[in-house]
């Protein structure tokens, strides 16, 4: 089954404790991205990757890091989480340059709470 | 810059119609519509490409006016299952990988 998976689905942590949220897709998609969703603000892009070893900042990158060492994986790293990073996070992927319409496929989401 | 959706929220009775609008300040190549149920991932509904086409999906259809940089989503004879938050995502160029999403429109359908 074609899908985007994220882990963990729920995470409660404390300020300053490094964490990683994993994202994996099995559709051989080139383009992957991370969004955060906050009430009233919709989906805002954090980082994106156009292919292996190619990443760039989205609209709200402060406090986050990413890496793309393999095509299928795109982890989101919070080196020193703060309470304002409490949010619902979605990973998404699409075909990339090969895709004319580039429909985004979203993972199930990770609800992060930073105390 | 985020596209602007209107209305922000709407409450309907089952069987009524709804229109959700998405406006951008930038020229668009594509508009994608998604629906999200509470606590779940956004689910793709349809995409409209530059050319002013209108698409339909059962009782849900959409139009795209690229001159006005606007798209509208039409829900006809709404069903309870249509409840959720609707997002438009805009692409600026053909094959654009990045989508910029609106803030969402919460649709509630009551029996």
Image (cartoon, helix red, strand yellow):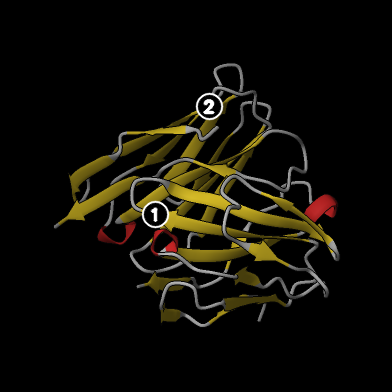
Q: Locate the N terminus of chain B and report the quarter of the image it occupies.
A: top right
Within 10 Å of disc 1 (Cα), the crowding (few <14, some 14-19, many 20+) is: some
Q: Residue at x 83, y 73 (%)?
A: A69
Q: Quadrant of residue A53?
A: bottom right
Q: In the rendered view, does B47 fall on the left or right side of A88?
A: right
Asked whether A18 or A37 is in front, the reply is A18
Q: Which residue is mark 2?
A: B24
Looking at the picture, how far across and down is residue A49, in whole percent?
A: 76, 58
Q: Locate the C terminus of chain B and report the quarter of the image it occupies.
A: bottom left
Whether residue B33 is visible to the viewer of this picture, yes or no, is yes
For mark 2, give the secondary structure.
Answer: loop
Whether residue A5 is visible to the viewer of this picture, yes or no, is no
Q: Marks 2 and 1: which is nearer the front? A: 1
Q: Residue at x 84, y 50 (%)?
A: A97
Above or below, comparing residue B5 to residue B47 in the picture:
above
Q: In the rendered view, does A96 fall on the left or right side of A112?
A: right
Tag 1 subunit: A
Q: In the rendered view, does B28 fall on the left or right side of B35?
A: right
Asked whether B89 or B111 is in front, the reply is B89
Q: Which residue is mark 1?
A: A38
Above or below, comparing residue B89 to residue A50 in the picture:
above
């Amino acid at each position: 089954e074609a899908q985007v998976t994220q882990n963990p689905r729920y995470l409660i942590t404390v300020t300053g404790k490094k964490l990683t949220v994993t994202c994996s897709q099995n559709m051989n998609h080139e383009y992957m991205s991370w969004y955060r969703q906050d009430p009233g603000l919709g989906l805002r892009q954090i980082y994106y990757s156009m292919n292996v070893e190619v990443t760039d900042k989205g609209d709200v990158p402060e406090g986050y890091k990413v890496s793309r060492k393999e095509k299928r994986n795109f982890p989101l790293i919070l080196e020193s989480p703060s309470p304002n990073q409490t949010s619902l996070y979605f990973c998404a992927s699409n075909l990339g340059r090969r895709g004319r319409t580039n429909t985004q496929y979203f993972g199930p989401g990770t609800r992060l709470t930073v105390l | 810059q985020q596209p602007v959706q209107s209305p922000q929220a709407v409450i309907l009775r089952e069987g009524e119609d709804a229109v959700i609008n998405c406006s951008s300040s930038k020229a668009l190549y594509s508009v994608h519509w998604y629906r999200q149920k509470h606590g779940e991932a956004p689910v793709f509904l349809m995409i409209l490409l530059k050319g002013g086409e209108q698409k339909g999906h059962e009782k849900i259809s959409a139009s795209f006016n690229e001159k006005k940089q606007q798209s509208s989503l039409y829900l006809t004879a709404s069903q309870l299952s249509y409840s959720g938050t609707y997002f438009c995502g805009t692409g600026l160029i053909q094959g654009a990988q990045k989508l910029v999403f609106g803030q969402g429109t919460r649709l509630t359908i009551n029996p």
